[in-house]
Amino acid sequence: METTLVLLKPSCVSRGLIGEIINRFERRGLQIVGMKMMQLDDDKLREHYSHLVNKPFFPALAKSMKASPIVAMALQGVEAVTVVRGMTGYTNGRTADPGTIRGDYSMSNQQNIVHASDSIDSAEKELARFFKPEEIYPYKHALAEYLYAPDEY
Ligand code: TYD
C-alpha cells in the first residue's frame, strides 16, 4: 500500500468541484485517510514548489494557489502514487488526455485543478508538509477484497 498527497487547488475549490473530484478518487477505489481545508501562504508555497521558485511564472502560480483555501488529501491504495498521477494527467489541461482530471476539467497550464505527488519519495515529504502524523487515519477499507485480488494488497 502507498499513500500519496493530493491538493484540490483554488481552481477546483472556487469552481465548486470539490465533491466531483473527490468522487473520482473514491470511485476508483482510493481510500481517503486524511483530509483538511487550509489556506496556503508564501512560506508553504516556496517549500512546496521549491523546484519552481526561480521560474518566471512562480509569482502567478503562488497567487493562484492563495486565491482560496485548498483541500489537502492523503489517498491510500496499491501503487497509489502512480494511479493518482495517471488520473491527474499532464500538467497543462489543454494537452491532458480526456478522461484525466485535468483533461476533463482544465483549459490551463496553471489553473489545473489538482496537485498530485510525482514519486513515492515526494509523497512521503509532501504528506509530512501538509499533515501531522496524527492527522492520517489508517482504517480497513470495507470493500478491499472486491477492489483487489488477495495477492495484490
Ligand atoms: P510541475 O511540478 O511541473 O507539474 P505538476 O503539477 O504536473 O506536477 O508544476 C507545478 C505547477 O506549477 C503546475 O501544476 C502548474 C504550475 N505551472 C505553471 O503555472 N506554468 C508552467 O509553465 C508550469 C510547467 C507549471
Image (tube, rainbow, N blue to C red):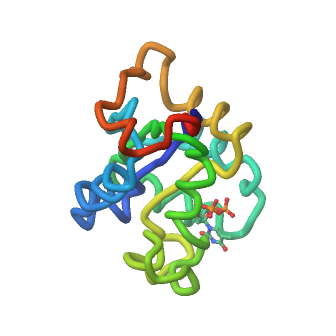
Which residue lies most toward the front here? 150
Q: Nearer the viewer, residue 60 or 87?
A: 87
Q: Quadrant of the N terminus?
A: top right
- Which residue corresponds to the image point at 49% horizontal and 19% vertical from the top-left? 132
Is 29 left, or right, of 115 in this rendering? left
Q: Nearer the viewer, residue 133 or 28?
A: 28
Quarter-wise, where is residue 109 in the image? bottom right
Q: Nearer the viewer, residue 106 or 144?
A: 144
Which residue lies most toward the top here? 134
| Image quadrant, ligand 1 | bottom right
From this view, report whether residue 23 is shown above or below residue 97.
Answer: above
Is 41 left, or right, of 47 in this rendering? left
Q: Position of residue 16 (x, y in %)?
A: 22, 62
Is 94 left, or right, of 119 in this rendering? left
Q: Position of residue 45 (x, y in %)?
A: 58, 45
- Which residue corresponds to the image point at 45% horizontal and 42% vertical from the top-left? 40
Is 21 left, or right, of 130 in this rendering? left
